[in-house]
Each structure stands twice: as C-alpha cells, then as structure tokens.
Image (tube, grey):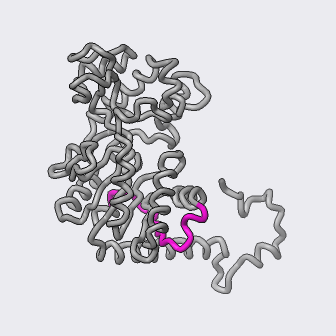
Amino acid sequence: MGRGVGTPSTGRSQGAEEAMASPSGRTLRKRKSLDKDQRRLDDLAEFFQIAAEAKSVLVFSGSGMSASAGLSTFTSPGGLYERAKKRFKVKDGIMLFCDSFYRKRGKDVRKVMGEIFFEATSSCPTLAHEALGRLEASGRLLRHYTMNVDGLHRLVDGMTTWSGRRDCPGKTVELHGCCREIVCTNESCPKQASDMTVEQGKAFRRGLDVLCEGCKGAVRPKIMLYDDSQSELITPDVVMEVMDADILGADLILWVGISFQQSASLEYFRNVSRVIKECGREGDVAQAIVNPCEESHFNAISGAGALLDDLKIIQVVSNANSVLADL
C-alpha cells in the first residue's frame, strides 16, 4: 500500500527534496498528515453536531462492532476467512460460508459454525452494544440491522429483537441469523427455531449431523450462507420491505464496523442510498461510516458510485465503542 516516499530507491535529487519542504520547514508529507488529522477532527465534530439533533437513528452494524469483545472478524488478517482457508485447504475461506460448499462438504461447514457458537457464547457485549441499548431506551433508535451472527445484543438489558414478522416492534434485526439458534430444515415442523444447546454446539463443532427433537429432521445453525437456498428459514424476505420503510423514517443512518469488502454489505448500502434518492430525502438524512480503517469509506463510496450523488456521507475514522458511547 505504501509508496516508499523518501526511500533511497526514489532517486530524488537534493533539489527535489528541498522542493518538498514548506516555509516552516515541515515537509509536504508531514503537512498532508496534519491536514488529514484536522479533516478527521472536522468530520467528527460535524457528525456529533448532526447526531445531537437526530431523533430517529437507523444503525447497520458489522463484525467490527464486536471485535473488541474478542470475536473474530471475517476479512481481517487472521480472521474467519483466512483461518478457514488454511484449515480446510480451500482457495478462499469464504467458500465455507457458501450454500454450494455446504451441500458438498457440510461436515466442514458445521465445524466452523460450531466454533462460531462457542466463541460468541463465551463473549460479552461491547460498549457499543451497551450504547445501542441506551439509544433504544431513549426512543431514538429506529432500528438496528446487524450482519453479525453473535447475538451479543441479546445480552443487553432492554434491547429487543425483531421476530421476522412485518409488524414486530423489535429493534434489532439479525440480517444473517444468529449462531445461538438452530432451525429445522423440515418446513412442516411446528418447532422451526430454538436455542442451540451446548451439546448441539459440540456436535456441530465435530461436524456431526444434529436432528430435530420434534420431527427428527435435520437441523442447522441459524446462520445465513451466501446464496442460501433456505434463506427464508434464517431471515424472511419481508425484511427488505421493513428496511425500506425504516429508511423513510430515519434522519441519521450509521454504518458501524463494516469493511464493505463483502457483497452483502455493499448491497445494503446501495439499497439505502437508492431509497433515499427515490423518495427525494437527500437533504433530510445524513449517513456516517464509522470505522477506524479509512479503507471502509473508500470501499463503500467506490462500490456505490453514482448512487451517492447529492447524498451526505460523513467519514468517521474511529472505533464503534467511543463513537456510539457519545451519542
């Protein structure tokens, strides 16, 4: 990523180096660094000014929000994808999260899901989760859509979860399911979803099949896979209609701990921006991308393209715990 500025290999002459210096003696490289720091402070100040006036906050969260709880992220070095790639000797670790791979090598996928379950159940909510709980209690949280499957929000007093019904008032929508639950793949089974027990988690971690206690059909962890043929069992399709309605009522939309390196997060980002523009709400709602990594902002902006014309997108280069705690 670096350009190697200032290294001997650049071949710059002494005159060229002098031309890079400002009258104060600081190099342009240093000045640019200072400009970047100031821009970050300005963006942060603008964000908090807008957030202070926001009465209806819509939040989208990714694995970065749970990272400080010790949970693995997907795309970062040493994360779930990288570990899966090494362990199961596949071209890309993301394959372990694809429905087509699950059909071929279900045992390996169940092992990964079992490990995710135990990692999540041994962790506690972060300061960011607690902050969302306070936001819900204050009546300012319109909805929280999470791509995380750890279910940590369920451990926060007062936080409610959307059940999958259009009219459910629950505030947190688990877009990709929750590793703390299992679903029966027999669509006629009256007991479709239930909490995963420790014994079931251990069985999944060993790659074993687990049967429904009611109908004896196969059950699976309630985690959405890419191109999941049983997606309706995880999160009903009506969720997108609920999301579109929520966008119409929001005056601030936060994207927290999301790298935008995965197609799903970009699709949500594009959908939100599309709805805002189609309804002529460009001047009524601001969006903020909250992530300590600047690349997340670049990924989102480049991935959405012209959809972002005339939309207000604030880059907040900071971690979720510190930002949400001050809302």
Task: Please report the residue visible at 35 percent of the width from the left and 77 percent of the height from the top.
Answer: 49
User: What percent of the width, then of the height, locates residue 221?
Assistant: 34, 27
Residue 320 falls in which quadrant of the image? bottom left
Task: Please report the residue visible at 49 percent of the width from the left and 20 percent of the height from the top.
Answer: 103
Q: Can residue 204 be seen here?
A: yes
Quadrant housing the C terminus: bottom left
Task: Please report the residue visible at 53 percent of the width from the left and 46 percent of the height from the top.
Answer: 263
User: What percent of the width, then of the height, locates residue 136?
Assistant: 21, 59
User: What percent of the width, then of the height, locates residue 239?
Assistant: 35, 47
User: What percent of the width, then of the height, locates residue 109?
Assistant: 44, 23
In the picture as drawn, the residue positioned furthest to the front comes out as 188
Q: Nearer the viewer, residue 93 or 35?
A: 93
Residue 147 falls in which quadrant of the image? top left
214 lies left or right of 203: left
Q: Nearer the viewer, residue 257 or 110?
A: 110
Residue 110 falls in which quadrant of the image? top left
Task: Look at the image and give the residue range highlighted in magenta.
Answer: 305-322
Residue 306 magenta-drawn?
yes
